[in-house]
């Protein structure tokens, strides 16, 4: 890397003081992020000063000045709304172009959301004051676009109230503790704010359009993918720690590159709630099994663990993996994996926050194996990796992949694994009882008996008669579950990809913008013969429907429908699409996979072996680990990856900042791999 590029990158990544306060409030603030926020604030200030200069003249009476100022703050929503929605799509072209992960981009949405609603608050309150001081409050407040020169004041007030509810339920302590309340209010109040704002001022749709068109393309891609239903094919639960590991079958064309995340919906628990999970590995090297780790924190994760304990086939809908959109050979829509830039990598994780780290470690192991096999695609990889994993219960360490445990015990020593038990209530020498929810398939998991008793299929109430014919020894056919949507695909299949090619993605975005343009032309002609509030609402509804529907029906659905029909035909003929891993009921006493790690004598070891990693008590000394890693490398950069609870993230963040501030020859680049609700 050229020195100038390295220097600029270091300068932009520099964390601003007061670091402890900023770390606890927003996870830290870099120079690059501060420049982005400063540019946004500068734009608002420029807009305000320009508007005041042009709308207020010397000698104007106070009521004219107040009215003009209130109107100006309404106009200031234009640049804010144009920028507000750009970071929110999960499949985001901004992520592909900038390389900034979505969990960092979404912070700008939150910051700009606060600023936008402050502008809306001032705009509304100034008008309320103006109406009150001119003795016309109720006349103007209840006006539905008849006495205010085309502005619908009542719709504006209702939009303002929707914004207040959206704002209050989006505060971090509400969002994290009452996610269901936040989710429902966020969706319903935004729709109300959007529609009523367009009714308040018919030209408001122009403010919302830039970001929402990107979101419309994202919805077109995800909306079709998430209609596919698959099942959890195997799961294990560690009762003492309240954690679970689950496997979900993935189509062979689904591409993956860690770290990435998937969003899951479990119809039996909720038909509306989608929850994000970091993804560990895509087993068997490209399109076989998605592996996720879950820890019980709230009602949803608790209900999910209870459902898994019932040993019934659990239907799920999946969106993603996100952050790894490699759509065609030789065409990558995201930059190369960040860990490839470093000779030395240090990973610090807490609890299930290790999931992203395990995925990256598995990718590094695969790259090393490819290099040993002489593959030209192996690419650059770290020479030394230190992974520190802390947990409150020793059973959480059983999520460790045995191949990684073997790599940590190998003689080449590229991977150093440190396991720390932070709870004083449990001794690491005790092996915790583990509830095993068996696998339906011996192809990927441990060998098991092929018997399937009638009680397994009839007592669950989830199986149709057609499904019974899918059990071993019975002819194959379309696989379905009772309760699946009759309006879309009704056959169980592995998780499907968002898109199959870069050409398809280009078609989706092209049709989204073309559809919005055509809808705007039609709506403009209607607005000439309708009331302004009617024209505004019709415009926003028409653009939203066409911009989402056109790419969904012409660029996404036909591709998925063709694949679905091919799978149905293949299933009826007993082909590979009739793989029983999606539908067979759980059997008894089958481990999650044949190479599961076990606890023995205060260590995590390979089954039937003494090879393993000893569990240490107490919290790790992160600063000492970082210094040690820097001392063993000649590279000026050390990649630091952190994931887990907020306290751990803050500690790693401040430690890396402190070491960078010492002015040494080594710089620590911090990567946040936590998924924050």
Image (cartoon, grey):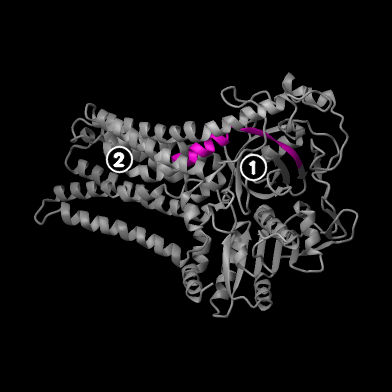
Residue 217 on the magenta segment: yes
Q: Is residue 294 left or right of residue 607?
A: left
Left or right: 119 as drawn, with respect to 380: left
Q: Nearer the viewer, residue 300 or 361?
A: 361
How far across and how far down the image is residue 148, in percent?
Answer: 19, 35
> Which quarter shows the N terminus?
bottom right
Q: Earlier in the sequence, mark 2 or mark 1?
A: 2
Q: Is residue 112 left or right of residue 474?
A: left
Label 2 to label 1, Cα distance in Å?
42 Å
Q: Is residue 79 visible?
A: yes
Residue at position x 60%, y 66% in the image: 341
The magenta stretch is 216-235
Residue drawn at the location 78% of the way across and 65% of the way down: 616
**Which residue is label 2 attached to?**
204
Rendered position, 184 above or below 490:
below
The picture quadrant where one finds residue 437 is top right
User: Which of these two is toward me, 284 or 526?
Assistant: 284
Magenta-drawn stretch contains 368:
no
Element class at badge 1? loop
Whether the residues at callouts 2 and 1 have beta carbons within 8 Å, the answer is: no
Residue at which label 1 appears: 253
Label 2 neighbour load within 10 Å: few <14, some 14-19, many 20+: many
Please tell me whether mark 2 or mark 1 is closer to you in this view: 1
Disc 1 crowd rating (10 Å Cα; few below 14, some 14-19, many 20+) is: some
- Residue 617 % position (x, y): 77, 64
Find numbered disc 2 in the image and state the secondary structure of the residue it sits on: helix
Q: Is residue 284 above or below residue 222?
A: below
Name the quadrant containing residue 146: top left
Residue 630 percent location from the top left of the image = 65, 75
Q: Position of residue 420 (x, y in %)?
A: 74, 62
Whether residue 459 is visible, yes or no, is no
């Amino acid at each position: 890397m050229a020195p100038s590029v390295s220097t600029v990158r270091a300068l932009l990544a520099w964390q601003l003081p007061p670091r402890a306060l900023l770390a606890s409030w927003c996870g830290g603030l870099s120079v690059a992020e501060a420049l982005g926020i400063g540019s946004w604030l500068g734009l608002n200030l420029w807009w305000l000063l320009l508007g005041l200069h042009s709308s207020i003249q010397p000698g104007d009476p106070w009521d004219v000045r107040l009215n003009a100022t209130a109107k100006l703050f309404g106009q200031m929503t234009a640049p804010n709304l144009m920028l507000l929605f750009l970071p929110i799509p999960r499949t985001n072209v901004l992520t592909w172009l900038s390389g900034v992960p979505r969990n960092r981009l979404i912070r700008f949405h939150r910051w700009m959301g606060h600023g936008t609603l402050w502008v809306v608050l001032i705009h509304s309150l100034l008008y309320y004051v103006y109406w009150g001081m001119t003795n016309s409050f109720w006349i103007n407040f209840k006006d539905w676009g008849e006495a205010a020169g085309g502005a619908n004041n009542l719709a504006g007030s209702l939009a303002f109230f929707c914004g207040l509810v959206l704002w209050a339920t989006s505060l971090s302590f509400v969002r994290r503790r009452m996610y269901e309340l936040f989710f429902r209010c966020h969706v319903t109040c935004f729709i109300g704010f959007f529609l009523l704002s367009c009714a308040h001022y018919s030209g408001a749709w122009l403010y919302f359009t830039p970001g929402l068109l990107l979101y419309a393309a994202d919805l077109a891609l995800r909306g079709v993918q998430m209609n596919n239903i698959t099942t959890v094919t195997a799961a294990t639960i560690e009762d003492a720690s309240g954690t679970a590991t689950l496997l979900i079958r993935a189509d062979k064309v689904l591409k993956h590159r860690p770290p990435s995340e998937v969003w899951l919906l479990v119809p039996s628990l909720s038909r509306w709630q989608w929850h994000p999970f970091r993804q560990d590995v895509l087993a068997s090297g490209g399109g076989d099994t998605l592996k996720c780790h879950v820890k019980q924190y709230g009602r949803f994760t608790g209900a999910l663990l209870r459902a898994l304990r019932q040993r019934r086939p659990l239907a799920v809908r999946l969106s993603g993996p996100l952050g790894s959109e490699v759509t065609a050979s030789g065409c990558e829509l995201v930059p190369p994996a960040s860990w490839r830039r470093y000779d030395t990598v240090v990973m610090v994780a807490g609890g299930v926050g290790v999931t992203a780290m395990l995925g990256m470690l598995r990718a590094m192991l695969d790259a090393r194996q490819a290099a040993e096999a002489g593959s030209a695609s192996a690419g650059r990889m770290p020479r030394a990796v230190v992974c520190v994993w802390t947990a409150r219960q020793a059973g959480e360490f059983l999520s460790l992949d045995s191949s990684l445990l073997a790599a940590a015990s190998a003689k080449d020593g590229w991977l150093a694994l440190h396991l720390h038990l932070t709870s004083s209530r449990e001794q690491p020498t005790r092996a915790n009882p583990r509830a095993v929810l068996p696998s339906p398939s011996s192809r990927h998991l441990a060998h098991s008996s092929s018997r399937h008793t009638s009680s397994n299929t009839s007592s669950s109430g989830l199986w149709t008669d057609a499904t019974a014919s899918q059990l071993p020894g019975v002819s194959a056919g379309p696989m379905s579950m009772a309760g699946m949507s009759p309006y879309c695909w009704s056959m169980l299949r592995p998780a499907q990809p968002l898109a199959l090619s870069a050409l398809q993605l280009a078609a989706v975005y092209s049709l989204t913008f073309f559809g919005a343009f055509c809808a705007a032309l039609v709506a403009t002609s209607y607005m000439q013969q309708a009331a302004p509030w009617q024209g505004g609402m019709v415009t926003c509804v028409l653009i939203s429907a066409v911009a989402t529907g056109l790419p969904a029906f012409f660029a996404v659905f036909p591709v998925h429908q063709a694949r679905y029909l091919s799978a149905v035909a293949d299933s009826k003929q007993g082909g590979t699409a009739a793989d029983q891993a999606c539908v067979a009921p759980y059997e008894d006493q089958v481990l999650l996979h044949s190479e599961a790690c076990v606890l023995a004598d205060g260590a995590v070891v390979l089954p039937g072996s003494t090879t393993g990693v000893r569990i240490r008590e107490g919290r790790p000394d992160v600063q000492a680990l970082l210094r040690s890693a820097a001392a063993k490398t000649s590279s000026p950069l050390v990649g630091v990856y952190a994931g887990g609870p907020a306290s751990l993230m803050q500690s790693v963040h401040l430690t890396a900042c402190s070491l960078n501030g010492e002015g040494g020859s080594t710089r620590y680049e911090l990567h946040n791999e936590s998924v924050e609700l």
